[in-house]
Image (cartoon, grey):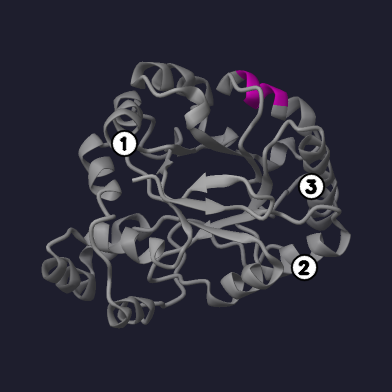
């Protein structure tokens, strides 16, 4: 089912996609990507320079039989390339075999090289603005930015970030950040909807899965989708990919949405950017 969310500039983006794994995680699975595109209707692939798999995507897309123009690809610029944005972007575009990148993000607010984080983020963002103005990106945004990082950027930028991709699951609901993004017209996107598997073992999630005749993973993905956010579960297993995508034939009640939200305990299962200056 091709449900879409519009970015602030009018670009239409699939709400549910496939997050691709990096070499330091569970690796890249060509068959899972082909299966997702060909048999599950996935039309959003989320990757990044750090993942090291961009050059593999054109072959998977070709094998799937889906037209490349039908697939929305998000990629992210790693901080080591914040001082060489255009060169890194051209390398990404070459690997992806795309004339225009659909959504290009600054991967993290923590830069860790040379000048301070704030100055380097702004410098890199201005380069993203140029790419967008030149028509080389359909949309630009950030990832893992908290309110303070967004506030600093908004004070200086010419173009607001169109999206902010952050960790989002019942244990990390990002309430204040989501409100900030909504107030500023920035589309919130959620990664790690399964909290790296932690939700699968929660008693409340298990009870709901039994009641809806769904799996715990499907309950967690559905919870994220019903907030209206773009959601990108990761899996390298075709069976799990299908499971994560088979979530459009049921709805969680308002009471159950609230029960899941109350599981928030502030944990980060990925990386905690709150202390980054």
Residue positioned 73% across, 63% down in the render: 149
Q: Is residue 81 above or below residue 154?
A: above
Per the image, the residue denoted by label 1 is 236
Magenta part of the protein: which range?
90-94
Name which of mark 3 and mark 2 comes first in the sequence: 3
Q: Is residue 272 above or below residue 128?
A: below
Residue 95 picture location, percent across and down: 58, 20
Residue 52 picture location, percent across and down: 52, 29
Magenta: main secondary structure equals: helix
| Residue nearer the viewer, 62 or 19 | 62
SS label for mark 3: helix
Q: Quadrant of the C terminus?
A: bottom right
- Spatial CA distance of label 3 from label 1 is 32 Å
Few, some or many residues within 10 Å of mark 2 (<14, 14–19, 20+): few
Few, some or many residues within 10 Å of mark 1 (<14, 14–19, 20+): many
Q: Which mark is residue 151?
A: 2
Residue 98 in magenta stretch: no
The answer to whether 79 appears left or right of 199 in the picture is right
SS label for mark 1: loop
Q: Is residue 70 above or below residue 147?
A: above
- Spatial CA distance of label 3 from label 2 is 13 Å
Residue 253 picture location, percent across and down: 28, 76
Circles 1 and 2, Cβ within 8 Å, touching? The answer is no
Residue positioned 38% across, 33% down in the render: 27
Residue 203 picture location, percent across and down: 19, 74
- Spatial CA distance of label 1 from label 2 is 36 Å
The picture quadrant where one finds residue 74 is: top right
Per the image, the residue denoted by label 3 is 125
């Amino acid at each position: 089912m091709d449900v879409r969310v519009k970015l602030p500039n009018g670009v239409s983006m699939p709400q549910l996609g496939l997050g691709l794994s990096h070499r330091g995680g569970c690796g890249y699975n060509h068959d899972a990507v082909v299966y997702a595109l060909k048999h599950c209707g996935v039309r959003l692939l989320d990757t990044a320079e750090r993942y090291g798999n961009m050059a593999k995507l054109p072959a998977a897309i070709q094998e799937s039989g889906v037209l490349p123009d039908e697939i929305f690809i998000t990629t992210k610029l790693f901080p080591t390339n914040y001082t060489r944005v255009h060169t890194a972007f051209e390398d990404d575009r070459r690997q992806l075999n795309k004339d225009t990148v659909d959504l290009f993000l600054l991967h993290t607010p923590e830069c860790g090289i040379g000048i301070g984080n704030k100055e380097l983020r702004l410098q890199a963002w201005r380069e993203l603005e140029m790419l967008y103005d030149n028509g080389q990106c359909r949309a630009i945004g950030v990832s893992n930015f908290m309110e303070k990082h967004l506030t600093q950027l908004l004070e200086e930028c010419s173009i607001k970030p169109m999206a902010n991709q952050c960790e989002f699951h019942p244990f990390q609901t990002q309430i204040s950040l989501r409100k900030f993004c909504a107030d500023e017209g920035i589309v919130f996107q959620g990664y790690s909807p399964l909290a790296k598997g932690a939700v699968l073992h929660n008693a409340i999630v298990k009870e709901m899965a039994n009641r809806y005749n769904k799996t715990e993973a499907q309950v967690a993905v559905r919870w994220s989708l019903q907030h209206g956010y773009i959601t990108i579960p990761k899996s390298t297993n075709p069976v799990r990919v299908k499971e994560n995508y088979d979530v459009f034939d049921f709805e969680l009640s308002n009471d159950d949405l609230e029960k899941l939200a109350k599981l928030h305990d502030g944990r980060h299962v990925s990386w905690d950017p709150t202390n980054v200056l």
